[in-house]
Amino acid sequence: MNGSEHRSYTLHEIAERFGGEVLGDGTTRVARIATLQNAGPAALAFLANPRYLQQLGATSAAAVLVGGAMRDATTLPRIVCEDPYVYFARVSRLFNPPPSAVAGMHPSAVVDPTASIAPDAEIGPQAVVGRAAVVGAGVIVGPGCVVGAGVVLGAGVRLHARVTIYESCVLGERAIVHSGAVIGADGFGIAMAEGQWLKIPQIGRVVIGPDVEIGANTTIDRGAIDDTIVEEGVKLDNQIQIAHNVHVGAHTAIAACTGIAGSTKIGRYCRIGGGSGIAGHLTIADGVEISGHTAITKSIDKPGVYSGLYPFDTNRAWRRNAAYLRHLGDLAERLRELEKQVAALERSKS
Amino acid sequence: MNGSEHRSYTLHEIAERFGGEVLGDGTTRVARIATLQNAGPAALAFLANPRYLQQLGATSAAAVLVGGAMRDATTLPRIVCEDPYVYFARVSRLFNPPPSAVAGMHPSAVVDPTASIAPDAEIGPQAVVGRAAVVGAGVIVGPGCVVGAGVVLGAGVRLHARVTIYESCVLGERAIVHSGAVIGADGFGIAMAEGQWLKIPQIGRVVIGPDVEIGANTTIDRGAIDDTIVEEGVKLDNQIQIAHNVHVGAHTAIAACTGIAGSTKIGRYCRIGGGSGIAGHLTIADGVEISGHTAITKSIDKPGVYSGLYPFDTNRAWRRNAAYLRHLGDLAERLRELEKQVAALERSKS
Amino acid sequence: MNGSEHRSYTLHEIAERFGGEVLGDGTTRVARIATLQNAGPAALAFLANPRYLQQLGATSAAAVLVGGAMRDATTLPRIVCEDPYVYFARVSRLFNPPPSAVAGMHPSAVVDPTASIAPDAEIGPQAVVGRAAVVGAGVIVGPGCVVGAGVVLGAGVRLHARVTIYESCVLGERAIVHSGAVIGADGFGIAMAEGQWLKIPQIGRVVIGPDVEIGANTTIDRGAIDDTIVEEGVKLDNQIQIAHNVHVGAHTAIAACTGIAGSTKIGRYCRIGGGSGIAGHLTIADGVEISGHTAITKSIDKPGVYSGLYPFDTNRAWRRNAAYLRHLGDLAERLRELEKQVAALERSKS
């Protein structure tokens, strides 16, 4: 729990803000969000997934959020709404607002005198802000962050502890970056010459749009020459790798441990499952959904769901079947041969 | 080498502590652990894996640890024991004890005055300890760590350099966390509303049991509402991602680069290979072993070994066979058709 | 852009340094590298990949680098060279030289008095350098780095911000390490004894050769007893995991998100695609190329290209085909059976 003091609200007050129909005692007062299973007093729980229906009967919640189909599934005070998950999200944001910046620089922070820091920005302990960096209104730079020379942090950006932004990168307004993320490290640009790898200077930037969220230990490399781009509203989970000159379209969401190789262009409103990989120099259309643990090796030009994951099994069954994978071509040839023989037999019969 | 001064022990002294049978000169004195291959004077080596048997003849070790089957495989002074690998582990711990906390806070550390720091705890240089955090007896907070508000570190916890613990998380006694690990960042909770992702506040904590070890750059997200739980004795390698509301059962060991999606429950004493992925909302039974690079997409209710990895081959052979993967259904249908035709031919023959 | 002031050069001056044939006006002066697409005035662009040929006609570059086959593909001033990509790399390095160390220790850095710091080395703000560490000539230790006790950083090493080097590890001359990388954390050494995992002290080091580059958030574990070795000229992308006692041969390049398990020996001049995994205790020959997202489970003793990636498809097609994977053995048996029956039918016919 965040430990912040919550205001409390009646169901009527909540419905006034966010809509929905109040059933039962609308003066019921709630002070926090909870799961059906672990709700305590003054808690508002929600049923978004029918698989948790049996928990509804046993919940200690003071009130619940339910969809239309479940309007009569409980006698508890409730708000009936169209999409209980989204409704829950809105109420939770009401109860748990993000912290505001506490204006000022911690005395242990090292801020270059040429940096421009908004008066209401917060620079945490042990942070470092480089030459000519621009820190916008209401920004929070967490403890131990390193903000490189010439970086621009738009208004309302929040860097959690220990984020690194290399020189010249740009973060749009309200972007949130979690601990350990590294924005703007050199892309993997090397050329083989006379038996040695020659490092190619990475002189592009990373430019991140507004309302982007970047998970813990995610890495986004700076462009080799032009910039790496992450458009507005993109949501990146933890431990994602975005290589140089990738372009991620607006409102795309990518789950953890996914890697995207250099110069690939991902469309808008894509959803990419965890542990996936996308090869370099591809174009992925808007609205593409990629299953977890899938490797994409060719461009995709139509929306739809794409998958390519080896189905697991008991080790014994897997071993038996996987062995044949190395002979699939032979199996197919033997099948073709048999088809010919059978056709001949049938002809000779008639 | 850790550079610490080691005490030396005779084989007799070691056997007195840890058991086993001393053969050869039991007054042989050893001062360090080494591999058979690179052992120098006063080194104790061990043979746990028969594949290294040929190294036994050439070793410069002063003495060796062997299993019963190998009791006569050398004439060196030796301790014969049941499990030489476990025995080696115990002796190595004797020679290489973990460092103790050097009581006190480095003057460069920033410790909130409301934090409660045990008198014998060590707070390293450039560390940050937040409001109302509780740092237990003998804890070591390494250089550059950020310990959030309200965090509780049990007695004997060791945070290596540059660990981040977000607010309100709890680490059990003697937990070890390696550099770059991030405990308690927000889970990937988003809801699509009117063409935008709405961030769902992540208000649960991460609660970690005693004797857990967490590898470098591993990330464990805080719960969305309830807590993310890692039970006692769990061992997590590097670059693992544990999503919100995962529950990892006691004494489970997970190898590097594995990702576990939200709300999945992993049993006790599981062993999960590197590079694996486990989808969300699953239940994995106690004692399940998962091979490396396997994606688990359904719950597993019985112990056993589970696998699902594409067998590699030369690129040429792989290309030839993999092409048929996209036509497996067709192959199976053609096979069915042939079976019918052959059955008809056999009927007509008789 | 790095924001540094560039000198400008004529094409003649460039060709004098790096060779090649100047066509068109050799007094054309260029001041920066650019892509064909986004080149502005005084920019030198290059055509290394024929797929960008159509951009050559529309470019605003002042001059271009082309290969012999493209010598007449443009009328712009140009340098014709054997390998335009390598040539571009050299020119880019001329325009974008790496920053030099600014001698001195930032007052916020915490440097142990027993550490040996070269007079011309740069120790950044908030950095920590431990007991008896050795920092060579011209080294840059970035902001927030933690350099452990006894670490040796060879001349010209560059640690970007927030790098961690555990005690006693060694980095060769000119090694570059990006933010968030962790060198020398404990390997995943555990032994099961009486229902508990026993931690095995990891007393080896990491020893890294000259001219190695290590990407952001990559982790390289210290050896269990002997050292983990990364030889000269190795290039590691981001988020790679190198386990204890791995040995990576010289000039091998590994793309992002790859994991290499313990004690595996990788040859020289290997190229390993992103998202791959290599099991423990294997030997990979020199010159092996491994495709992305491939898991290597056996040693490879010959150079060549190796692959093993599940081909993706639409979810519908994948589902249909993948279902048969679990019955490949059965399919093969049915095929064998049919072959027998058909052979019998053919015999009976004659």
Image (cartoon, coloured by chain):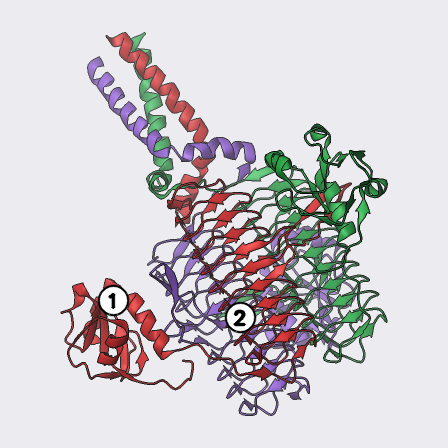
Chain colours: A purple, B green, C red
* Residue at position x 70%, y 41% in the image: B85
Chain to which mark 2 belongs: A
Q: Quadrant of residue C139?
A: bottom right
User: Is C142 on the left or on the right of B235, as rendered?
Assistant: left
Would residue A218 be visible to someone looking at this image?
yes
Quadrant assignment for the N terminus of chain C: bottom left
Q: Quadrant of residue A333?
A: top left
Quadrant assignment for the C terminus of chain C: top left
Neighbor class of circle 2 (other Cα within 10 Å; few <14, some 14-19, many 20+) is many
- The kind of residue tagged 2 is Val
Neighbor class of circle 1 (other Cα within 10 Å; few <14, some 14-19, many 20+) is some
**Image location of residue C170, percent across then percent down:** 58, 63
Marks 2 and 1, how far apart in space? 31 Å
**Image location of residue B80, percent across then percent down:** 76, 34
Total labels: the figure holds: 2
**Image location of residue B208, percent across then percent down:** 73, 58
**Image location of residue B324, percent across then percent down:** 34, 38
A17 vs B156, nearest the viewer: B156
Chain to which mark 1 belongs: C
Q: Which residue is mark 2?
A: A182
Would residue B250 be visible to someone looking at this image?
no
| Numbered label attached to residue A217 | none
Q: Which residue is mark 1?
A: C52
Question: Would you place residue C44 above or below residue C82 in this image?
Answer: below
Q: Secondary structure at mark 1?
A: helix
Residues at marks 2 and 1 touching, judged by CB atoms closer than 8 Å: no
User: Is C230 on the left or on the right of C344, as rendered?
Assistant: right
- The kind of residue tagged 1 is Tyr
* Residue at position x 33%, y 71% in the image: C90
A106 vs C167, nearest the viewer: C167
2 and 1 marks on the same chain: no
